[in-house]
Image (spheres, coloured by chain):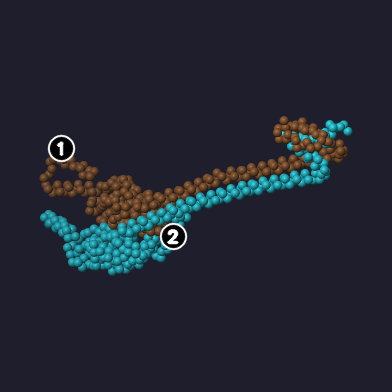
Amino acid sequence: MNNILKTTFGLIFIVIVLLAGGAFFIVNESEQVVITKFGQPIGDPITTPGLKVKLPFIHTANYFDKRFLAWDGEPKQVSTRDKRFININTYARWRISDPLKYAQRLFEESKAQTRLGSILEGATQNAIANQDIIELVRSSNRDYVSQNEADKDQTEKAIIESGRDALTKEILELAKERTSDLGIEVLDFQFKRINYVSEVRKEVYERMISERKRIAEEFRSQGAGESARINGQKDRDLKVITSDAYRRSQEIKGKADAEAADIYAAAYNKGPEFYRFMRTMEIFKKTLDKETIMVLTTDGDFLRYLGSMK
Amino acid sequence: MGKRIIVGDQEFVIPDRFPKSGLAIFLLLIAMFMIWSSIYRVELEEVGVLMTLGKFDKEVKSGLHIKWPAPFQKVIKVPVKRELEMEFGQRGTKKQSGRRVNRSEIEEESLMLTGDLNVAMVPWKTQYRIGDAFKFLFKIRDPIGTFRDMNEAVMREVIGDRSVNEVLTTGRQEIATDMEQKLQKMCDQYDNGIIINRILLQKVLPPKQVQDAFNEVNTAEQEKEKMINEALGNYNKIIPRAKGEGEQTVQQAEGYATDRVNRAKGDVSLFNDLLAAYKRAPEVTRRRMYLETMADVYPNVKQKIILDKDLEGILPLLPLGKDGK
């Protein structure tokens, strides 16, 4: 009876000791572990999650993150090849790809961050110093869609050689190469923000303003030009219309007059003498009115019988 | 009478007369803790990620569930069905997770360079949801912060390939679509389990300092339209009328022509008839016509002076021009 109790307590005691000594430990999904014995790595790193066993007291479990980790660059003022001063803010994602190497070389994350920082910042600075600003901004030679003529020459694009995408990839490759023996892998590198430094901004804004003013002027002048063109067209059309109408009417009248003249001539040629007589009579009727004073002699045909009956 | 203790969803009654053994109390507390930590609830919009000894076990749907107590099994709840939103360059009413940010910092989020090296302020909202809870939790440390960084980088890439005019006016929809695709691609590359629902581009503006100049362009464009419209209006006022008037002139000429020809024909017809009669008896007709004319004319004449054919030299003495009185 006493023996059973003793062994029970003994077993419980052993379990407690093992637990206290850290014989069992849990590795989470997000972790990986390197076992060390007095600072010396033992065996392969543990990269799978679950309950794990090690020697208590002697072995230490060193936990490292297995996930993508952040490296967030400080905003840096740099100058591009075409002497533009910009603030550039970058970020990278990396992970501990070889925990054993990592444990030997860096061990602490802050150290890793510092190393990454100097590598990435150096690479960035070198890359930017050799590029025009447009290469950092654009990633393709895509054509701008412009709404109207006035915008067109303004959006005349600079042709890029490599561009943003290619540049970040280049930096990423360089960083990958340089971090390969640190047990870390850089997975992605991006320019988060690129902006003109505040001293330059004013200048840029002024340029933008003058550019806008130029476009505005162009619009106004286009308006005035177009309006003048329409007015000119109006004047021209007006002249065309009125002169055409005049010409046509004169032609019609002329033809009619000629036709009438022909008709008259044809008829009157048949009896010219009679025509003359008849017309004269008609003219008498029309012209001799009540204002007329008529002096006649009895010699004439009309009054011949007034003087004598013969 | 008993003491009531509420732990989580459970309620316990502790009797007044309690065994004074310390071990018993200790065991009881452990038992209570174990019961408490083995019951959990997953809300309707959530999914529970069940971890057994640190290892991913399975995803648990909404409802009340039982698991092993704390050190053995853990549950992380992720709101997979909820639409989440992230704002850039502005802060709306919805609380953003994380630290407080000041205004200039918010502005910095939206300030970016366009392809023609102009500056534009592009605020936007990203609506997304967590499509894969496991990936979201275990692929990336600080997935939300990372997602913010990705958003900023991708938006700048998209804006960087467009002119300031496109950004401000025509290209909005295209930018949102392009952004959505690129961001989703990046999420897939990061394998962070996030699904982009949509990108909502807010009011895109040029920086404050240049807004007036941009407005001036708009005004000038409208002025241009106005001038053209006015000129067209003037044209339309004058030309159709002139066309009508021209037509009128032509019609009048046609009328004149018809009139002229008809009259000529009439006159000639009359003349021909008279001529025929005349030819039949020239002398008589001639005299008749003469006398008829005289008969017509003579009564209407104001003053008639009749001189004998033998009288001579009287003409200068006549009172011509003095009304004949």
Callout 1 amino acid: Met
Dot label at residue B1? 1
From the viewer's perspective, is B268 left or right of A188? right
Q: Where does the image place residue A292, in percent across and percent down from the top left?
A: 73, 35
Asked if B280 appears above or below A28 in the picture, the reply is: above
Q: Which colour denotes chain A? A: cyan
Q: Where does the image place residue A192, in percent across and percent down from the top left?
A: 33, 58
In the rendered image, is residue A156 in sight? yes
In the rendered image, is residue A103 in sight? no
Name the residue rendered at 27%, 64% in the picture. A117
Q: Secondary structure at mark 1?
A: loop
Provide the chain ID for the residue under circle 2: A
Dot label at residue A169? none
Name the residue rendered at 66%, 42% in the picture. B252
| Image quarter hosting the N terminus of chain B | top left
Mark 1 surroundings: few (<14), some (14-19) or many (≥20) residues within 10 A: few
Q: Secondary structure at mark 2?
A: loop
From the viewer's perspective, is A10 left or right of B112? left
* Viewer-closest of A236 and B131: A236
Callout 2 amino acid: Glu
Provide the chain ID for the residue under circle 1: B
* Viewer-closest of B90 and B65: B90
Q: Which colour denotes chain B? A: brown
